[in-house]
Image (spheres, grey):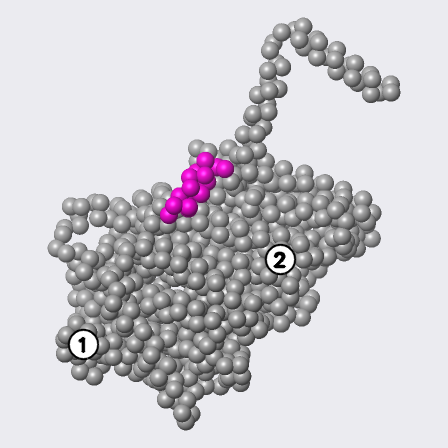
Amino acid sequence: MIYIFVCYGFLLSAMMGLIASWVDRKLTARIQYRVGPPFFQPWFDLIKLSGKELLIPTTALRQVFLTAPVFGLASVILASTILWLNDLHASQSFVGDLIVVVYLLMIPSICIMIGGFASGNPLAGLGSSREMKLILSYELPFILAVLVPVIKSGYSLRLNDILAFQMQHGVMITSLSGFLAFLVCVLCIQAKLGLVPFDMPEAETEIVGGPLIEYSGICLAIFKLMKYMLLFVLPFFVIILFWGGWRLTGVHLWLGLLKYIIFILLVVVIRNTNPRVRVDQAMRFFWGTLTGLSSIAVLLAWIGK
Amino acid sequence: MSVLGSMFKLTTFSFFVGVFIIFFTLVVLLYSLGSMRGQKNLPQYYFYIILTMLSALGVVLANDLLILLVFWGFLGVLLYLLISFGQKERTSQTAKKALMIVAGTDLLMILGIGLVWRLVGTLEMDKVHILLTSPTALVAYLCFVMAAFAKAGAMPFHTWIPDTAVDAPVSVAAFLPASLDKLLGIYFLARVTLDIFHMNHFTNTFLMAMGSLTIIFAVMMALVQHDLKKLLGYHAVSQVGYMVLGLGTGNPVGIAGGLFHMLNHAIYKSCLFLSAGVVEKKAGTTDLDKLGGLAQTMPVIFISFLIASLAISGVPPLNGFASKWMIYSGIIQTAKGSGHLWILWLMSAMFGSALTLASFMKLVHAVFLGQPFKEIPRTQTPVSMWFPVLLLASLCVVYGVFSKLPLKVFILPSLGQHVVFGGVWNSYAAFLLLLSGLFIGLVIFLLGKKNSKRLTAPFVGGEDLSQYPEMRISGTQFYRTIEDMVFLKKVYALAEQKVFDIYDVIKRIAHQSFKVLSRLHNGILPTYMAWCLLGMIVLFYVLIK
């Protein structure tokens, strides 16, 4: 368990996330007719940040301000470990099920919010409140969408059951309901990652990074690392639910990598072809269109499509 | 002895509830030593608290429905007396309202007892088993459920709780609506649902629907409150929804989850109320617009409040998550049977949890973090006030991480059924992994910590914050976007007019009908004489016929 925790849960996920963020940045740059960063740029960023001076605002509640990133990172590592454990040993189930992962993946956002609140900066407070409203928005369609695999696999909340079901009956995404729910999930992941068009909590151009405005040095580095890891863990979760997971043997290794790359490409394309929306627009979009879509997916799953 | 034996009975369930009744009484007594200092009529206050504990114990030990009713009635009166210790403007109205709602539903309970007597001819709870086949049985069951709902504060009898939270002394709010009344209300609901009546599909669905409604409605109300204690009061309502929902699932894991949630709720909600009391004492107000930045002056209270708010929002690995997770599994299990509506219940439970998180993020910001409203002098909080808060907060962590412990000692024995967990949640392993994750984070943090640290002014684009008081974000306006949504706006407007307040609705209807009757009192003697004569004629006719 400790082996999987360190090697897969932390190191592999972090590495994949860093590579994915490079892909994201490079592609974005190419779309904007720029050259883009070299392959190791995310690594350099982290190393550079960890060598920088740590600035603490006078208004901040220091202990909370400094520890919030650490808690966020720990929760992502825990979620990623649970996913890997279930993915690698599909015959057994470990530590937590689908609901646990859904809730664990909410903690990073909570940590960002609390960190922002603790900085005592009004812009951070504003950004954090937007983050909370964004959570409220996407949570409704997201929960509905992740219930589709639950219904299809015979009402099991265990991730390994869902994986085993897909091994026997084909992946969820090939069915109509699975496909719809997958689409909803992709958009919710976009919001969970805080990427354009749902980046209003950070909105560099108006509230200067929102909750992250006061962060610098090693704390910012940890938050960045957490976000990079989320860039892997969230798609990985969706791939486990809808796309048969990622087995690390033979041809499945490359297939799994392909699935992940397709997912990241989707995210990058959405990110680069949309403007930032306001939080009330996002709310209407998630509570209206997407909730409707995922309700249809649930109904379809229920009648077995 | 045999008479006493048929009146009282110690079951594992009543033992479990009894232990926690005593525990919460001790916590509140300890807290009151600090919070009630210098108030009037203190001997009476402590006397009432002890008496409440004894009556509550009487309720859980009673085996005869009449005995239970008597103690239940005592509790209503004691609630009234205890609320009256508050020193707010509206305290007396609130006390009256609470008494009316609780005592009014006692009436329903008497009716239910009468019906049970008629159905089976005995009132001993361990001997009564009624199938819900006849309408009479159903009416009796619903009467009992209403009484339990009023006590626990589920909809539609919830309205006394937010008012009590504001107007009663905070120790009373933490003692009765937050912990003891929940324990008793849900205890009675569980006894009625599990022992006395045999549930069927209809009643299960009814309970789950009421639970879901309570969760969503109360949490939406909580979201827009501007007062710390009122907000907590609405959460005390919304959390009942989870317990009712859990009991309504009708399968062991859901029921165990509901009972576990009852315990967890009592722990974190009293912790939240007690910390609100410390805040009130220090800052002199619970208006969220006039608080802020208190974490600097009361770090212990802040950490406890944070833990309890994360627990109530269902963040793993705290205790709120453990019980909510069991309730979710219970709901999913109903899907395997014949429950087609499970997805509605699950959605309202899970989404309600996110809304809970939202309103507590608002509180954490508005009360403890964010920018201070005014300077609050650093004074020592008495040990008797911060220690109970810290104790309850640490219990939130312990019961979350070692959730098997309370389950094994208290809840599963009182249920007496084999519980099959649908999913996996190994809280202990998760906690260890989380600790290791924290270790990794800490190592990275320490790697960078060798660099220098510097204090700077917060960056707000070069503005001087002290010149712009409107730049202070108090947090009360966080969810304006939601309030302003077309449909919700109307609902909130209706709630503002107290359309959903059953007490207010009945009051209005009563006032209208009294108006008609008051016309008869026109002060003219001959009219009164005529009425008397008319009445006598009717009376004689009825008697002689």
Name the side, left or right, on which B291 lies relative to B493.
left
x 37%, y 50%: residue: B482
Q: Quadrant of the N terminus of chain A?
A: bottom left
Q: Which mark is residue A30?
A: 1
Q: Nearer the viewer, residue B141 or B297?
A: B141
Residue B105 in picture, x, y percent from top left: 64, 40
Chain ID for label 2? B
Name the side, left or right, on which B247 lies relative to B276.
right
Q: Is residue B474 visible?
A: yes
Q: Amino acid at mark 1?
A: Arg
Residue A150 in picture, x, y percent from top left: 52, 71
Question: How many numbered marks are there?
Answer: 2
Mark 2 Cα within 10 Å, few/some/many (few <14, many 20+)?
Answer: many
Q: Secondary structure at mark 2?
A: helix
Mark 1 Cα within 10 Å, few/some/many (few <14, many 20+)?
Answer: few
Q: Secondary structure at mark 1?
A: helix
> What residue range appears in magenta?
B485-499
x 63%, y 37%: residue: B104
Q: Is residue B429 visible?
A: no
Q: Are marks 1 and 2 on the same chain?
A: no
Name the side, left or right, on which A225 lies relative to B499.
left
Residue at which label 2 appears = B248
Question: What's the distance in space between the residues labelled 1 and 2, CA to CA?
Answer: 56 Å
Magenta stretch, overall SS:
helix
Relative to residue B236, is residue A53 depicted above or below? below
Chain ID for label 1? A
**Contact (Cβ within 8 Å) of mark 1 with mark 2:** no
x 25%, y 76%: residue: A24
Residue B313 in picture, x, y percent from top left: 44, 59
